[in-house]
Amino acid sequence: ELLDKNLLLKLKNKEAITLDGKKVMLYANIGNVKDLGFVLESGAAGIGLFRSEFIFLERTDYPTEEEQFEIYKTVAETMAEKPVIIRTMDIGADKQCDYFNLEPEENPALGYRAIRICLTRPELFKTQLRALFRASVYGNIQVMYPMIANLFEVQKIKELVAEVETELTEAGIQYRLPKQGLMIETPAAALISDTLAKEVDFFSIGTNDLSQYTLAIDRQNPHLDTFYDSHHPGLLSLIKLVVKNAHSAGIWVGICGELGADPSLTQEFLAMGIDELSVSPGNVLPIKKVICESNITEYEREIYAN
Amino acid sequence: ELLDKNLLLKLKNKEAITLDGKKVMLYANIGNVKDLGFVLESGAAGIGLFRSEFIFLERTDYPTEEEQFEIYKTVAETMAEKPVIIRTMDIGADKQCDYFNLEPEENPALGYRAIRICLTRPELFKTQLRALFRASVYGNIQVMYPMIANLFEVQKIKELVAEVETELTEAGIQYRLPKQGLMIETPAAALISDTLAKEVDFFSIGTNDLSQYTLAIDRQNPHLDTFYDSHHPGLLSLIKLVVKNAHSAGIWVGICGELGADPSLTQEFLAMGIDELSVSPGNVLPIKKVICESNITEYEREIYAN
Ligand SMILES: [Mg+2]
Ligand SMILES: [Mg+2]
C-alpha cells in the first residue's frame, strides 16, 4: 500500500507517455474552485473539464460577468500556462437552478438543458462568453460547449461568439478568443462528428451522457444496473468513430467522462487514437501509471492476432 | 379533394410496388382491437405493429393468459393469413400501469420499461409468450420485442421462449412458434445490429424512440421543437446501418415509427433497402401512392449525380 503510494508519487512529475512514445494529454476534471488544490497536487497537466455550472448552482441569482470573470481569471492564473478547458454552463437535467425558473419536465435528461438553454437565452450565454474571453488573456483558457446534437447549434454559437468579439472590441475591452471545442455526448453528435469536426478546435467525449443516451438508460436509476453495460460495443464503436472523424479533420479528441478513468479501457482508447483523458484528480496518477506501462503497438499487434 | 380520394381508393387493392419493381410490405399500426376495422379498410397488407400494452393499460389487474390468447386469436383470425406483428408489452415510460407498482423515476423514458420489465419479471413475460404462441396456430402471428439494447437480452429471451415451448409441449397444449424480431429503437441496438441480426427473423426500426435517444430530446417536450430535427443526418445514417446489417444477415427490416409515414423520406428509405413500412391506418394509402409512383433506380441515379 505504502509502496504503491510511493510509486504513484514518483509518477507525479512524469509525462503521460507510453512505452512506444505516444504522449497523452492527461488532465483533471474539476467541479469547484475549491478543488484547484487537488488538481495542482494531482499530477495533471491541465484541467480537461471545468464544470462552470457550479458558479450558477451555488448562487441564488445569476452571477454577473465580473463575478464569472474573476473566477475564470483566478483559475487560469493559478494553472499558469497549463490548459484550462472550461465547459459553458450545463444547467438543467440533474443540475437544477431555481432562479432559472425552468418548468418541470417529464424526462429532464432528455430536456431543456445546457446549450439548449444558452441558445434560447443568448444574453445569459453571451455574459458567460464575455467573461471567458476576457479571462482568456490571463492564461490558457479553452472553451467547450455541452450537449451539442445539431450542426446549426454550432453555427449559432459562432454567430454569438462573433457578436461578443465585436462588442468587446467596440468597447475597447481586452480579450483573447480561446480555442473552442465541442462535447460529444449525444449519439447524434457522434454520428455527425465528421461534419462537426470541421467547425472546431477539439472534441471532448462525455461518456457519461453518451452512454446513457446510447443505451437509453438513466445511469442514476438503480433498477437498471443489470442492463447497463458501460463497455457496450456500440458505445465503444461510437467513440472510435468520433476519434477517426476528429483526426480526419486534424483536431484532437479526448474523453472527459468516467470511462476515461477506467484502467481496463485505457489501452483500447489509446489504440483508437485518443489524445486526451480528463479524469478526477484522484485518478490522474493511477491512469498515468497505466499509460506509462502501455505499449500500444504491442497491444494492437495482440488484438490483431486474436 | 374528392378526386384525390377516388385516386387513393383505387390504390386500396393494389400492391405497394415501385415503378421499377421493388415490392414493399406496407402494413398498419394498431393500438387497440377496436381499430381492427380501420386496418381492414386501410389497404394495408397486414399489421406491422400491434401494441399489446393496450391490453394491460385498459385493465385494473394483469390480464390472464386466456384473456390475452382470445384477443391475439381474434386478431389473427380476423386478419386471415395476413401478417400480424405483435409487440410484447411496452409498459413504463409514458405508458404507466398502476398495478405494475413501478416506482416513480427521474427519467422514465430512460427507465425501467418494456423488455427490461419483462426480463426481470419473467412469469409475466412468459404468460404473454404462452398466449402468443397458442394464438399463433390461428393465423400469421409474428412477435417482436421492444427496447432491446444488449445482446444478452436477446439470449435471455431465447431461454424464456425455450422454457415456454417445453412447458406447452409437456402440457400437450397446441402452439406454433411464431417468427420473432427485434425493435431497433435504441442507438445501442442499431450500433450492434450486425450481431443482433444473426439472432432473429426480422428487425422493425422504432423511429420515435430511436430519434429521441439519438438526439437526446424528449419528443413530447414542447420546449425543444427548435432542436428536434426529425430528419437528422445521424438518425438517417443509423437507419441505413441497420438496413445494411439486416440484409447482410439475410433478414428483412422495416420501420414502424412516425418517420415511416413521412412521404418526403419514402424514396430515401426504399433506396436504403427498407423492406417494410408500418404506418397508421390513415397513412397507408398516401404512402402506397408514393411507393407506386417511385422509381428507386432513377432516384439513386439522381442522388449519385448530385
Ligand atoms: Mg454531460
Ligand atoms: Mg418505442
Image (cartoon, coloured by chain):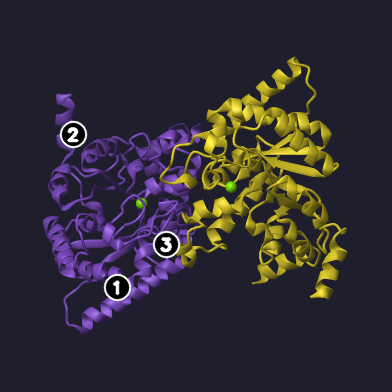
Chain colours: A yellow, B purple
Q: Which circle, 1 or 2, is nearer the viewer?
A: 1
Q: Nearer the viewer, residue A302 or A153?
A: A153
Q: Nearer the viewer, residue A87 or B78?
A: A87
Q: Nearer the viewer, residue A247 or B154?
A: B154
SS type, badge 2: helix
Q: CA distance from mark 3 to mark 2?
A: 36 Å
Please state the horizontal and vertical placement of residue B166, each as a whole percent of the image.
27, 81
**Quarter occupied by residue B173:** bottom left
Please state the horizontal and vertical placement of residue A210, each as a whole percent of the image.
56, 51
Please state the horizontal and vertical placement of residue B106, each as a whole percent of the image.
45, 52
Q: CA distance from mark 1 to mark 2?
A: 46 Å
Q: Which residue is mark 1?
A: B123
Q: Is residue A269 left or right of residue B14?
A: right
Please state the horizontal and vertical placement of residue A11, each as a whole percent of the image.
85, 63
Quarter holding the N terminus of chain B is top left
Marks 1 and 2 close (CB-CB < 8 Å): no
**Dot 3 falls on which chain?**
B
Asked if badges 3 and 1 are on one and the same chain, I answer yes
* Label number found at residue B197: 3
Q: Which residue is mark 2?
A: B8
Labels 3 and 2: the sequence-earlier one = 2
Asked if badges 1 and 2 are on one and the same chain, I answer yes
Residue count near mark 1 (Cα–Cα under 10 Å), binned few <14, some 14–19, many ≥20: few
Q: Is residue B120 left or right of residue A56?
A: left
